[in-house]
Image (cartoon, grey):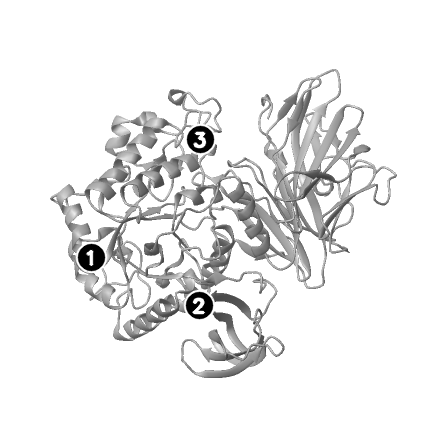
């Protein structure tokens, strides 16, 4: 974009589009021009976008209007005036483009107030039914400079439905809220993709809102993060969604600016379909999950049950039990290091230093398990040796202040500063190459995003380089580790945050990341199966964090990897946090349950199956349902506090299926595509295995 010469305006926080801003009293009302009906139409047969003579647009799915005519794209100028009505001057119609077998491009042009030209390019691809890629360009037609203080694109109001609406947001928030929420009458969420706290930010730049019969999703498809927002807000007539920016843009006479390329989709069901489409778009642009080693699907035991005061003896004393219940990974969590930033052994617990760390990895391997080590890169405590010797690595804001990482009482390091990258590559070579750990648990709510960096020592061309090159930092870490051990497990765990899609090429495993409920375990799992792939190696995080501290069913049914942090034979004597009732110790009753669920996981390996995320709507379908196809069978999972009544088995193929309760082994009868409803009664969960009976026509 053109150089910014104004201060970023916080008054635009609530700006969704021209209409919403009018309601909020932020900008004056602009009388509508006397254009009615469609003057131009762009469609792929599923998504139809109609434009009137003022370049307002209406969206439909398969002929059913989802919105009224809205001022989908517009700007607010620095003088406070709003330009959101553009007289349509040109429409190219559907022009073939030689990409991906028969795409079509539509180009429209309009002018507002005689001084600003808007050009809209819409591209439809057969491989993305119901979706369009939109590029908006503005050009100053006047003889004096023009400053755009804010802009919005793909701003539409999904019309109200008697059953309401649900929404998904890929933004990160310090309160660690649900990624999927019902849209209440007073719902408003800006979904800013920059920092929403000193150490919470970034995410997946897509938002979706849907009714039972259809929805809209928008996002940007640039290959680096952009400091934009994806606001969603309830309105009297429905729910508004948009993409917007408020970084000032100066346009000299004749100069043009092209906004971030936008993804817009009309879809059925919940957020899974648009996120899956977004994943495929980004894969073609070079951002995709790497090859996944078999080790990424192995069950996990983590020493975090002993917290930061963990001792080697506690780990060694638990390994035999962890192995016997079916775990294959043993994770040494936070507490082994000298300090956050100083990634060498704490000699009060590992007096032999490097030798003791290597001995830990070797000891774990003698149990037939794989050793993994916890680390929190890009953080350093003020008292660390790293900060004493290399304060030049700090990420600084415009005032020269460091960015705080609250949980670790640390400062953020700049990922775009080459010495920072080199330092952590050296750390990786020590952990994996010298000590012999076969995996990394990369942890911290600050992993998703960083603020723009103004540290003069870094000689950034633009402060936003730190934001845009964070993904390059993680890829450098990943490539270093995989270069040493191609089967290494590299996990990124942004504690409680949403997940930065741009980091996906730099990891081959991810957890639910401090879920606050079993609902979060499941909704995060469904989201990851969309943005990483239907067989993504996703773990439910420590089962002790789920409802009741034992909800393996949510992990199993979503196609996730079981993970636990049990202690044995007793809990830590020095807990940092208050232990839950009963603590984390593996009692005989727990052990029987742990063994049963982990054995069931290992038997069916649903994590490697194909998650069929479009079959059920996580918001509207009751009971909540998920299904995974694996080894010719369909595995269903239903969830509710209590349920008595019919449940529908969607996705069945030809012929009949034998139904079995996966957990108890009890027969549940048969079903077919023509007769796919059974009556069921359960508490918390019901998991069903549907096996073809072999009578398909």
**Front position among marks 2 and 1:** 2
Q: Which of 231 and 528 is in front in this view?
A: 528
In the rendering, at what x and y percent does residue 453 appear? Answer: 44, 28
Which class describes the residues within 10 Å of circle 2: few (<14), some (14-19), or many (20+)? Answer: few
Q: Where is residue 525 in the image (x, y as percent from the top left)?
A: 47, 58
At mark 3, the secondary structure is helix
Residue at left offset 48%, top offset 44%: 501
| Secondary structure type for disc 1 | helix
Q: Separation of disc 2 and disc 3 at Cα?
A: 44 Å
Callout 3 crowding tier (Cα within 10 Å): few <14, some 14–19, many ≥20: many
Residue at the right extreme of this rendering: 34
Q: Are marks 2 and 1 in contact (CB under 8 Å)?
A: no
Q: Is mark 2 on a helix, strand or loop?
A: loop
* Residue 367 can be seen in this image: yes
Q: Which of marks 2 and 3 is in front?
A: 2
In primary-sequence order, the first of circles 2 and 3 is: 3
Residue 505, quarter of picture = top left
Is 659 placed left or right of 677 in the picture?
left
Residue denoted by label 2:
631
Looking at the picture, tell me which residue is in the foreground, 582 or 679.
679
């Amino acid at each position: 974009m053109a150089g910014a010469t104004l201060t970023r305006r916080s008054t635009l926080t609530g700006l969704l589009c021209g209409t919403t801003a009018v309601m909020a009293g932020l900008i004056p009302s602009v009388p509508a021009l006397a254009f009615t009906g469609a003057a131009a139409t762009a469609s792929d047969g599923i998504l139809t976008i109609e434009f009137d003579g003022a370049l307002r647009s209406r969206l439909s799915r398969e002929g059913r209007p989802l919105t009224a005519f809205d001022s989908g794209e517009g700007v607010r100028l620095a003088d406070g005036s709003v330009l959101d009505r553009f007289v349509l001057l040109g429409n190219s119609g559907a022009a073939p483009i030689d990409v991906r077998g028969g795409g079509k491009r539509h180009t429209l042009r309009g002018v507002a107030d005689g001084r600003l030209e808007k050009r809209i390019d819409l591209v439809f691809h057969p491989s993305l039914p119901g979706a369009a890629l939109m590029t908006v360009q503005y050009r100053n037609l006047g003889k004096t400079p023009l400053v755009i203080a804010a802009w919005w694109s793909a701003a539409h109001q999904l019309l109200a439905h008697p059953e309401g609406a649900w929404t998904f947001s890929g933004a990160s928030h310090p309160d660690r809220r649900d990624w999927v929420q019902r849209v209440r009458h007073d719902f408003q969420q800006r979904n800013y993709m920059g920092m929403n706290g000193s150490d919470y930010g970034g995410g997946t730049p897509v938002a979706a809102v849907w009714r039972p019969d259809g929805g809209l999703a928008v996002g940007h498809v640039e290959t680096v993060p952009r400091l934009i927002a994806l606001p969603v807000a309830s309105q009297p007539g429905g729910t508004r969604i948009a993409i917007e920016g408020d970084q000032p843009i100066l346009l000299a006479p004749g100069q043009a600016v092209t906004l971030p390329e936008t993804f817009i989709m009309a879809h059925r069901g919940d957020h899974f379909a648009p996120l899956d489409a977004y994943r495929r778009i980004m894969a073609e642009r070079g951002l995709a999950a790497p090859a996944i080693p078999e080790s990424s699907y192995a069950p996990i035991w983590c020493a975090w049950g002993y917290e930061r005061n963990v001792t080697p003896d506690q780990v060694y004393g638990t390994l035999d039990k962890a192995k016997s219940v079916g775990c294959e990974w043993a994770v040494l969590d936070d507490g082994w290091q000298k300090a956050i930033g100083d990634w060498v052994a704490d000699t009060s617990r590992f007096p032999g230093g490097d030798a003791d760390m290597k001995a830990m990895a070797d000891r774990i391997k003698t149990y037939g398990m794989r050793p993994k080590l916890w680390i929190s890169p890009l953080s350093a405590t003020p008292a660390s040796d790293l900060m004493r010797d290399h304060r030049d690595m700090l990420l600084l804001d415009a005032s020269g202040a460091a960015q705080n990482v609250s949980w670790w009482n640390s400062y953020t390091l700049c990922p775009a500063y080459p010495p920072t990258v080199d330092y952590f590559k050296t750390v990786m070579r020590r952990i994996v190459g010298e000590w012999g750990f076969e995996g990394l648990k990369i942890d911290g709510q600050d992993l998703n995003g960083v603020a723009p960096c103004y540290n003069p020592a870094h000689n950034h061309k633009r402060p936003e380089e730190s934001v845009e090159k964070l993904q390059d930092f993680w890829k450098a870490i990943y490539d270093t580790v995989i270069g040493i051990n191609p089967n290494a497990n590299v996990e990124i765990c942004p504690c409680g945050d949403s997940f930065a899609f741009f980091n996906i090429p730099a990891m081959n495993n991810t957890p639910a990341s401090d879920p606050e409920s079993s609902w979060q375990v499941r909704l995060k799992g469904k989201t990851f199966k969309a943005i990483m792939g239907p067989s993504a190696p996703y773990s439910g995080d420590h089962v002790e964090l789920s409802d009741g501290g034992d909800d393996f069913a949510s992990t199993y049914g979503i196609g996730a990897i079981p993970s636990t942090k049990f202690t044995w034979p007793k809990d830590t004597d020095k807990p940092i946090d208050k232990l839950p009732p009963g603590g984390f110790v593996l009692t005989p009753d727990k052990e029987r349950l742990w063994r049963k669920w982990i054995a069931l996981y290992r038997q069916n390996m649903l994590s490697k199956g194909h998650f069929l995320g479009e079959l059920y709507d996580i918001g509207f379908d009751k009971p909540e349902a998920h299904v995974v196809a694996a080894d010719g069978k369909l595995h269903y999972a239903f969830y509710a506090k209590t349920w008595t009544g019919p449940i529908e088995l969607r996705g069945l193929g030809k012929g009949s299926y034998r139904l079995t309760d996966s957990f108890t082994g009890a027969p549940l009868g048969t079903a077919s595509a023509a007769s796919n409803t059974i009556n069921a009664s359960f508490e918390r969960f019901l998991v069903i295995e549907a096996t073809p009976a072999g009578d398909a026509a």
